[in-house]
Amino acid sequence: MSLKWSLPPLQLPYLCNGTFLLRCAVLSQAVAVVLAFAPGIHTDLLQRLGLISIFVHWVALLSTLLFCFLRHQLNRLSPAKILLSCSGIFLLLTVVVSCLAFAAFAGKSAQFSQSLATFILGNAMVALIVAIIAMQFFIMHSERSLQLQAQSNAEFNALQARIQPHFLFNSLNSVAELIHVDPKAAEQALLDLSALFRAALHAGEVVSLTDELTLSKQYLSLEQWRLGERMQVQWLQPVDIIDIKVPSLTIQPLLENAVRHGIESCTESSILKIDVVQTNQSVSIIVTNPFIVQSQARKSNGIALNNIRERLQLHYGAASQLTQSAGAGVFRVKLVLPVSGHIS
């Protein structure tokens, strides 16, 4: 896998603030202490600690200031180029400060008894190791921030979608009609609506695949009362579903897209087909529905699918897939979930 595909979107934050500078100073001093008290060193430890502390703090401070100055330019680059550029700047400043320190203290301290090339090479190797560690922490921080943002957006979007007036009014109208015709069905419709609202309030959590499929059926049940014979649902799935965890509201939005942008666009009775196929490695959910091409509907449908795809990417990485195809009046979405995958 290439580097650009394995990295999350990265943005260099503003580093020239008091909190970060204080943390930077503390971490720099910690690195200086580790280097000063490295095993096998027999020179004056206090003098060594002082010189290394000055050296490390100068490199850290200059790097931070340069990152702040170049922040907007760096953030226009790809994630891989941001990491490489920041590492290159850090190493360059390490070499520059090493040359200045060697020129100032050569012959005045036992720390500088080695040659200039050896001194620079040793400092560059240490700087490279620190840069690699910093890159890993930066990537982990970015992934965590993106995940929290995606969960917050998912909760808001899902709640907003469920409380849209047209959906709520349509569902309540269906219940009102059922009360006089079939009171038990009206009660079940209210329970299904309650389940959808409850799931929307917990959209950032993970649930079992069985629960997610049950929620999807409850959603279709509500829409079935509203659309009547205009929608025919064909649901095919194994008797025993593999017990895996999935992000909440992963499958239901796919069915909502199929209903809103597919079934509702057709004037005649239409078939919504859901196939659940499972193997030892994955579970595939295939949703097929007819549609009439409408530019605005297809555009909003694409945005919704992209949002789901981003959530899956954060949870599973490259292990999951969400593909779509359209042709001959049929729209098809295939969701592939790994049996053994990472769920945060």
Image: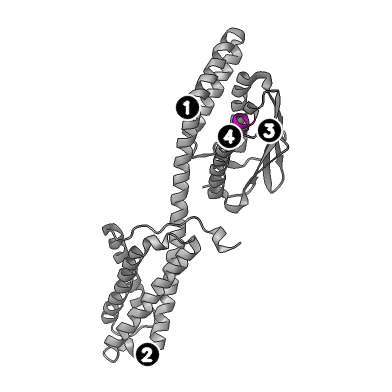
- Residue depth check, mark 1 versus mark 4: number of the one nearer the observer: 4
For the point 64% across and 31% down, which residue is it? 262
- Name which of mark 4 and mark 3 comes first in the sequence: 3
- Label 1 Cα crowd, 10 Å radius (few <14 / some 14-19 / many 20+): some
Residue type at mark 1 is: Ile
Residue 129: numbered disc: none
Give the residues drawn in magenta, as a range.
258-262
Residue type at mark 2 is: Gln
**Relative horizontal placement of residue 8, taking residue 119 as reference (left or right):** right
- Residue depth check, mark 4 versus mark 3: number of the one nearer the observer: 4
- Name which of mark 2 and mark 3 comes first in the sequence: 2
Asked if the stretch drawn in magenta spans residue 301, the answer is no
Q: CA distance from mark 1 to mark 4?
A: 20 Å
Q: Which residue is mark 1?
A: 163
Residue 297: numbered disc: 4
Residue type at mark 3 is: Asn
Q: In which image quadrant can residue 304 be found?
A: top right
Q: CA distance from mark 2 to mark 3?
A: 74 Å
Q: Which residue is mark 3?
A: 289
Check whether the beta carbons of the residues at disc 1 and disc 3 lie within 8 A of each other.
Answer: no
For the point 50% across and 55% down, which residue is it? 8
Residue type at mark 4 is: Ala
- Label 2 Cα crowd, 10 Å radius (few <14 / some 14-19 / many 20+): few
Callout 1: helix, strand or loop? Answer: loop
Callout 2: helix, strand or loop? Answer: loop
Residue 341: image location, x then y, percent: 60, 49
Q: Which residue is mark 2?
A: 114
Q: Is residue 224 above or below residue 273?
A: above
- Name which of mark 2 and mark 4 comes first in the sequence: 2
For the point 32% across and 86% down, which residue is it? 102
Quarter of the picture containing the N terminus is bottom right
**Relative horizontal placement of residue 49, taking residue 263 as reference (left or right):** left
